[in-house]
Image (tube, rainbow, N blue to C red):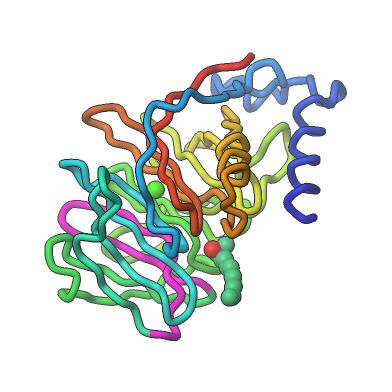
Amino acid sequence: AAAALLLLLLLAAAYAPWRADSPPAAALLGRPASASATRFYSFDLIREYPHDPDAFTQGLLYGGNDTLFESTGLYYRSSVRKVDLLTGKVLVHHQMDGHMFGEGLTLLGDRLFQVTWMKKDGFVYDRHNFSKRTSFTHKMTDGWGLATDGKVLFGSDGTSKLYELDPKSFEVMKAVTVKYHGDEVPFINELEYIDGEVWANVWQTDCIARVSPEDGLVVGWIFLHELRRDLWKSGNTNIDVLNGIAWDEGNRRLFVTGKLWPKLYEIKLRAVD
Ligand code: DDQ
Ligand code: CA
């Protein structure tokens, strides 16, 4: 019911005619500020791959050479994995402590950074050897999503905030509020940095928000409800929310999946406006 309500609010916000006026500050930054400037996207399915239906996907990223790094949640089941893209086979598996609920994951240099749910604790793993591990604490209100532009860590905590964290001190260097036509977008979850934008799963929706990290404005909405519908149609009624965006920059491939989804999808966006 909460998901339906949020979706309804998003759609209402999208089509409300009284929101068509442009805030001048946003316009000066050259960012879409009016209803007509925000782009909407559907997708074309390029290919589907198997995905571990027991993986409660919380963080997803491309690891090169047809591999993915993935972190999973749930108590006593949380993990960090290296996964073979083509087969879905888990190549390296690190089981987290039972009281840790794995969340967002990102790769900066040779190190994987991970945050955890309902705790300020995070972990840093060597990408080649997950047992080489250190920990850190951060100052976001919670640990949900992580991504990187190769310099800073982007983080989310389930609010409408998008944080920039220093990867050495883990201090918050900057925080913007994700907004669509002046309304805050809460439940910002799994993240991916793509071509200067931060793409974010919005928890409990089948939508991805394309966010400008400079000012937090939503510059595009991607609608992926068809993926869930097709999984349901083929009998997968046990699936949780859409979550997990991975970008293969070299080959410009975009991958998405969800928590407990038996499939991972390579998609191409198609503008619908
Ligand atoms: N988060 O990933 C959105 C940050 C948290 C998801 C928490 C889901 C809790 C599910 C608990 C199920 C217990 C069997
Ligand atoms: Ca990601």
Report the magenta stretch's main SS: strand
Q: Residue at x 55, y 17 (%)?
A: 271
- Residue 260 at what x, y percent from top left? 49, 59
Q: Residue at x 57, y 44 (%)?
A: 234
In the image, 27 versus 258, the foreground residue is 258
> Magenta segment range?
98-117
View extreme (right): residue = 18
Q: Is residue 93 above or below residue 88?
A: below
Q: Is 238 displayed left or right of 110 in the figure?
A: right
Q: Residue at x 58, y 57 (%)?
A: 240
- Residue 50 at what x, y percent from top left? 36, 47
- Residue 197 at what x, y percent from top left? 44, 34
Q: Is 16 displayed left or right of 66 in the figure?
A: right
Q: Is residue 227 above or below residue 46?
A: below
Q: How many marks?
A: 0
View extreme (front): residue = 235
